[in-house]
Image: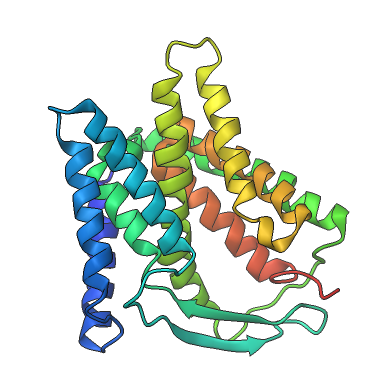
């Protein structure tokens, strides 16, 4: 199977190099990077088991802070101004977030086991099946709940949206929720008869709760989508989970109301 971490690490490194060159990163970013280095060192050392727990705890705190844009030094530029992609949709704007991708950087470098490598054959089998399941559960559920409608479109900003969603959204979320949380829980529950199923369900629930700001409907829909992503990860590895998540997001963006119907 192809070396997914190094491919995406190279692209992320290029992006951060360009952001630094164009002044989108301030010196206070060094605080976040320094704390992530400390967390990584604590997790990778083998002499003090308790130190590894502290390292993981520090990373979880930093991941939350980066995802919520609480840490200084990141000048996230808005690249899509507020607009309606269809007349019945809520307004949507998009920023190129430079803080959240550090979560993915840390995970790919410090916890290479999150990749869950599988053969190319398993990847090709798992991805379309998981994508079909996720689409039925999440998009079908969204249609039934009345939060989206059929709305095929291809806005001028579509290519920028796709690139941002792949590298700065989907990669980070799958590395965190499937690789780190589901993969970590699977290792923790390895002696339980239904340990992998429990890990998948818990990771899906946490993923759903991360969407609580959009309302209970999106908590439910994201949890259902997470089941599909979790199955893709379990049988096809991180690459399959990433492809499934990105595929579902692209279907939502291109074929249905995005992000959702206006109230």
Against 156, residue 11 (above or below) is above
* Residue at x 57%, y 24% (from the top left corner): 198
In terms of depth relative to the viewer, which is nearer, 182 or 230?
182
* Residue 228 seen in render: no
* Residue at x 69%, y 70% (from the top left corner): 259
Quarter of the picture holding the N terminus = top left
Determine whether, in the image, residue 126 is placed left or right of residue 10.
right
In terms of depth relative to the viewer, which is nearer, 237 or 77?
77
Determine whether, in the image, residue 200 is placed left or right of residue 111.
right
* Residue at x 69%, y 77% (from the top left corner): 153
Against 71, residue 6 (above or below) is above
In terms of depth relative to the viewer, which is nearer, 87 or 61?
61
In the rendered image, residue 84, in percent from the top left (x then y), is placed at 71, 85
Q: How is the image coloured?
A: rainbow
* Residue 157 seen in render: yes
Determine whether, in the image, residue 199 is placed left or right of residue 256.
left
Against 224, residue 149 (above or below) is below
Quarter of the picture holding the C terminus = bottom right
Determine whether, in the image, residue 145 is placed left or right of residue 222.
right
> Number of numbered discs present?
0
In terms of depth relative to the viewer, which is nearer, 165 or 105?
105
Against 177, residue 171 (above or below) is below
Quadrant in the picture for residue 229: top right
In the rendered image, residue 33, in percent from the top left (x then y), is placed at 23, 63
* Residue at x 40%, y 51% (from the top left corner): 61
In the rendered image, residue 123, in percent from the top left (x then y), is placed at 43, 38
In the rendered image, residue 255, in percent from the top left (x then y), is placed at 70, 67
């Amino acid at each position: 199977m192809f070396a997914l971490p190094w491919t995406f690490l190279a692209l992320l490194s290029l992006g951060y190099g360009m952001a630094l060159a164009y002044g989108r990163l301030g010196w206070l970013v060094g605080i976040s990077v320094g704390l992530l280095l400390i967390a990584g060192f604590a997790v990778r050392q083998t002499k003090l088991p308790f130190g590894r727990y502290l390292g993981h705890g520090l990373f979880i705190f930093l991941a939350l802070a980066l995802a919520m844009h609480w840490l200084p030094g990141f000048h996230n530029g808005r690249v899509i101004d507020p607009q309606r992609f269809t007349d019945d949709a809520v307004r949507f704007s998009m920023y190129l977030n430079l803080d959240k991708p550090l979560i993915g950087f840390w995970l790919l470098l410090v916890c290479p086991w999150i990749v869950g490598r599988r053969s190319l054959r398993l990847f090709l089998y798992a991805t379309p099946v998981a994508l079909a399941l996720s689409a039925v559960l999440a998009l079908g559920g969204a249609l039934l709940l009345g939060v989206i409608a059929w709305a095929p479109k291809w806005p001028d900003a579509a290519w920028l949206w796709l690139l941002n969603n792949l590298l700065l959204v989907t990669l980070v979320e799958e590395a965190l929720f499937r690789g780190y949380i589901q993969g970590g829980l699977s290792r923790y529950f390895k002696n339980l008869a239904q340990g992998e199923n429990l890990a998948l369900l818990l990771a899906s629930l946490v993923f759903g709760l991360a969407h609580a700001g959009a309302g209970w409907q999106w908590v439910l829909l994201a949890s259902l989508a997470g089941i599909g992503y979790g199955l893709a990860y379990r049988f096809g590895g991180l690459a399959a989970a990433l492809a499934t998540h990105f595929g579902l997001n692209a279907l939502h963006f291109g074929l249905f109301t995005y992000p959702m119907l206006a109230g």
